[in-house]
Image: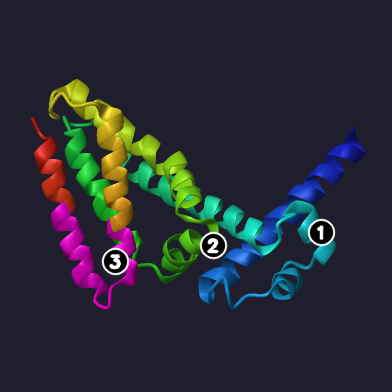
Amino acid sequence: MEASGTRSERSDATRLALIESARRLFGSRSYAEVSLAEIVEASGVTKGALYHHFPGGKRDLMEAVYEKVEAEFTEGIAARVLPAIGEGGSDPLDVMEAAIGVTLDASLDPELQQILLIDSPSVLGWTRWREIADDHSLAVIKALLNAAKESGSMKPLPVDAVANLLSASISEAIMSIARSDNQDQAKADSAAALTAILDGLRA
């Protein structure tokens, strides 16, 4: 059992090393410019080990990197805003607005832009990109909308439908920021538009 556990720990460490090395390389340059040989060398493992963990090669590794970065991104935002629900009578829609602001601010980070917004959609395809994003962020959006509905601060609208539409709007906003020649202005415009959407939900 101990030997098996040790092998398992080594396997997990190898997988993590590959993901972290790929993340640094993808984030500093781009998916297309990074070779498997560079990732293997940066990770200190063999190419065989890479294909053992990621049979699809670089594409599978990109998906793992994206999932990790998206999870950390969403968890960071949730940790900052969700505790505010119920504290001092905070309106969940105000908390949602703050969460959107944090999301738009974070979308200006070059590494996040490269991995989350530029490379992942093109490498994984739009459908898979949205599935992974929704696995993480949609739960936060639904929690805030349910809290708003229960508190009476939101109109009696179907939460799932509103959450899906709001999630899509936020995704489009951060994509437009990443692609803009004037990202600060794009962020301000997106923030204003998303605030207007939230105002339309208020009871």
Mark positioned earlier in the residue sequence (1 or 2): 1
- Give the amino acid at mark 2: Val
Which span is picked out in magenta? 173-193
Residue with the most extreme top position: 150
Q: Nearer the viewer, mark 1 or mark 2?
A: 2
Q: Secondary structure at mark 3?
A: helix
- Left or right position of 168 against 41: left
Residue 10, percent from left and from top: 81, 50
Q: Nearer the viewer, mark 2 or mark 3?
A: 2
Cβ atoms under marks 3 and 1 closer than 8 Å: no
Residue at (84, 61) in percent of width and height? 48
Q: Is residue 85 visible?
A: no
Gap in Å between the C-alphas at discs 2 and 3? 19 Å
Q: Is residue 202 visible?
A: yes
Q: Secondary structure at mark 2?
A: helix
Mark positioned earlier in the residue sequence (3 or 1): 1
- Left or right position of 37 against 91: right
| Most foreground residue, 115 or 125 | 125
Q: Which residue is mark 3?
A: 177
Residue at (52, 75) in percent of width and height? 28
Whether 6 is drawn above or below 88: the answer is below
- Give the amino acid at mark 3: Ile
Q: What quarter of the picture does the C terminus occupy?
A: top left
Is residue 191 magenta-colored?
yes
Circle 2 packing at 10 Å, graded few (<14), some (14-19), many (20+), is some
Q: Determine which quarter of the picture holds residue 55.
A: bottom right
| Most foreground residue, 35 or 125 | 125
Circle 1 packing at 10 Å, graded few (<14), some (14-19), many (20+), is some
Q: Which residue is mark 2?
A: 123
Q: Which residue is mark 1?
A: 49
- Left or right position of 31 against 84: right
- Give the amino acid at mark 1: Ala
